[in-house]
Image: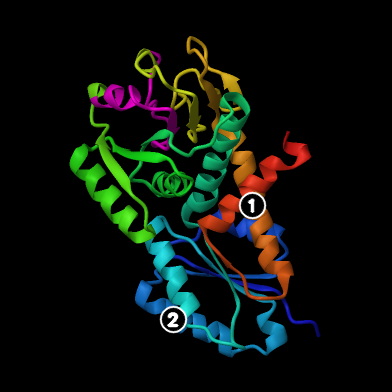
Amino acid sequence: MERPYILHLFTPGSQMSPFDVNMAADAGYQVIAPYTGVTLEGVAALTQDAIFSRSPKGLARTAIFIGGRDALLAADMLEKAKRAMFAPFQVALMADPSGAYTTAAAMVACVEAALREHAGSTLAGRRVVVLGGTGPVGRIACVLAAQAGAQVALSSRTGIDAADAAARLTGERFGVTLEGVSGGDRAAVRASLETADVLLSCAAAGVQAVGAEDLAFARHLRVAADVNAVPPAGVAGVDVMDRGKPIAGMTGAVGIGALAIGNVKYQTQQQLLRRMHEAGTPQVISFREAFELARQILAAPAAA
């Protein structure tokens, strides 16, 4: 009998995301086993239970997916699982808490592509403001933009103290420099927009982070990207389907909407899960691998 493809889903939360279960099934996994309430300290034991119970052929058909809602904790759990394994007892690993890694990867890759197409430049040296920067998507978008050479400002609607703390912790964890800025009121948001070349809106669904009046302060803006698919738009003038469409009333600025980003995110997560399923060798997949794949997807002729 052929050994089944098994995906073990670890989450510190009380339930696993149905989105991830569906994606795993569509990627070809036959047995999908969720484990809830998983702590950082419990990752190693669960991982070793998974690796010691199968032969090398079975291990090639075994993988671990780490979810949850905390971008930093997921990275630490991924590292714990990796360190718990040794040759030949190794399986594929992937982290994507709340889809944050693949969403952030798709968002930043879309912005990078839009800058190249509409401004003839990259993220290097650009001033990037990330609204909703304390959330999982916002934090990883900050890291990816900084790793691409941008000067990144992490904004929090709860004020400068929360922004500074998140910028410091996230920067230290991933080895980048991030600046905290306040997004606690309209004046603070407008002040950050005045210096922004790129705006990444990662605010909560159904919340308009930037109104039409606010955009008047974004005199240097080249690209605005929004991951909010729930009306109203997170950034006024950016429709969910926009992909490099000029923003009405702005000179030289284009918008990227939530569904345009979501399409790249979906392809990225699905292809990464299939990579684990089909590779036959252990893979370790985090947001860096997701970003490189998102870039490839956007560079493919079908995406042009």
Three-letter residue code for mark 2:
Ala
Three-letter residue code for mark 1:
Leu
Closer to the camera, 265 or 110?
110
Closer to the camera, 164 or 98?
164
Instruction: Tell me residue 119's x, y (percent).
Output: 56, 25
Q: Is residue 3 above or below residue 259?
A: below
Quadrant of image for the N terminus = bottom right
Q: CB atoms at circles 2 and 1 under 8 Å apart? A: no
Quadrant of image for the C terminus = top right
Q: Is residue 199 above or below residue 143?
A: above
Look at the image and give the residue range highlighted in magenta: 188-212
Q: Is residue 102 above or below residue 219?
A: below
Residue that badge 1 annotates: 293
- Count neighbours of disc 1 (C-alpha within 10 A) and say few if under 14, some if 14 to 19, many if 20 or more: many
Dot in front, 2 or 1: 1
Q: Quadrant of residue 153?
A: top left
